[in-house]
Image (cartoon, helix red, strand yellow):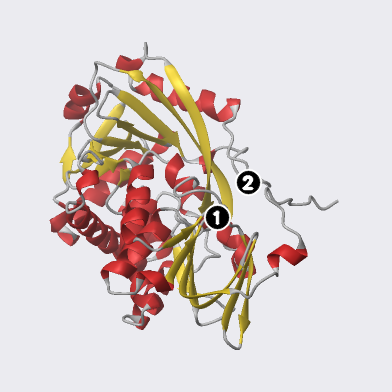
Amino acid sequence: MTKLELPEQPLSFWLVNKSHAIPTQILIVGGGIVGASTAWWLTKLGAKKSEITLIEADSIAKGATGQSIGAVYTGGIFPYTKLVKFVGEDAAKTVWQLSIENQILLKKEISHIPQTKDLIFNFSSFRSAKKGGIEIKEWEESFNVIEHLFPESRSKWISEREVAKLTGSNLLGGAFFTPLDFSLNPHKLAVILAEHSQVNVIRKEKVRFIEPKSNGLLVVGSNRRYIAQRVIVAANVHARSILPELNKVITPVRLEAFSTEKNINKLPGCWLISDAQLNITQYSSGEILVTGGGWQYESAVIPTLKSLPTATVQVSLEKNFFSIFKKFNKSRVLYRWAGIEGLTPNRLPVIDISELSENIVYTAGMSNYGFSLGFIFGKILAQWAIGKEELKIEKLRILKNDLRRRSVRST
């Protein structure tokens, strides 16, 4: 039996259709990091604010963006050599180059906004794994490549002894150190970008479908209808319900997280422990934030999009974190939460023109790349929307690679 999806604020046929569709030149669907960045870049690039509308199913950054811990990694979370093996060298290089550009742009642009003073914290990152395993060898191999391929990343290899001094843990091998990386407040960033764009923001509006018409693109929402000349779908996992072509491309998974009480012990930088599937950062006031990528858990691939933490995953996250970072063993866990992310088979985000219309572009599958690529993706989408860089989207189809390949994580 098919499960019915009931609207939170249902309107009758007469109320939904009581007036003509609202005209807008550019319509952005999704108020996460990519949608908010797109709105910000559109106004910066000269588009008229009155001609831009951003609609969000809930509130700005309420979805995956606001559920993350805001760690920004150059190149993402996978060893470069592993990424090359599964998606090809051109796609892997593109991810790294774009992520470097993303960091430079983000730091430069937000430095001019007064409210962003305390937005960024915990500079630098360490990507590591347990001693003697395949993962730590892959990180060291990747460093040897990146050191020559992208010297601007200023990456270094940190020895086991140095890692032990920094973490108090003797379980980890060395670490791939990148000083340009950082952590930020993800919810605050998206809200600031959306507010400073000064575009029309409509909340509590879930898009049902998009239909090409002679006078533009009809976008039917839960409360209103819109006619747009160009539509940007930046709804991550929820893009599947708007563009059916993404149903076989995007898989929803659950990201889970917890945070501890404030700690006097310090953990410099953000940490990715890849074989334990941990992302860790310490907030400026001392709390430790820990997330785990959902794909390693059987319960993570879920039939319904409910962002609720589960006992199985939370226990696993705690066990992995406290067994490695023993100096935090006495810390109490105060908050637990979960979010829904979208994954592609090759674990790279997709950005492309929709099969439905050449005037619709989408980006989805941003899991683990939302803050590594989200800001520059916003710029690319904005340039496309105002007709300044049509070919950039075409070039980025390389990220789709062959989506039928085995996943990076499957080995």
- The x and y percentages for residue 407 are 50, 55
- The numbered mark at residue 28 is none
Residue lying at 57% horizontally and 31% vertically, measured from the top left: 309
The local secondary structure at tag 2 comes to: loop
Q: Residues within 10 Å of mark 1 (few under 14, many from 20)?
A: many
- Left/right of residue 168 with respect to residue 392 in the rendered view: left
- In the orientation shown, which residue stands out farthest toward the bottom? 214
- The x and y percentages for residue 157 are 17, 41
Q: Residue 21's quadrant in the figure? A: bottom right
Between 20 and 269, which is closer to the camera in this rendering?
A: 20
Residue 317 position (above or below residue 46): above
Q: CA distance from mark 2 to mark 1?
A: 9 Å
Q: Is residue 283 visible?
A: yes
Residue 216 position (above or below residue 351): below
Q: Residue 17's quadrant in the figure? A: bottom right
- In the orientation shown, which residue stands out farthest toward the right? 1
User: What residue is shown with label 2?
Assistant: 305
User: What residue is shown with label 1?
Assistant: 237
- The x and y percentages for residue 166 are 20, 25
Between 160 and 13, which is closer to the camera in this rendering?
A: 13
Residue type of the residue flagged with mark 1: Val
Question: How many discs mark residues in the rendered view?
Answer: 2
Q: Is residue 247 visible?
A: no
Residue type of the residue flagged with mark 2: Leu
Earlier sequence position, callout 2 versus callout 1:
1
Residue lying at 48% horizontally and 46% vertically, measured from the top left: 64
The local secondary structure at tag 1 comes to: helix
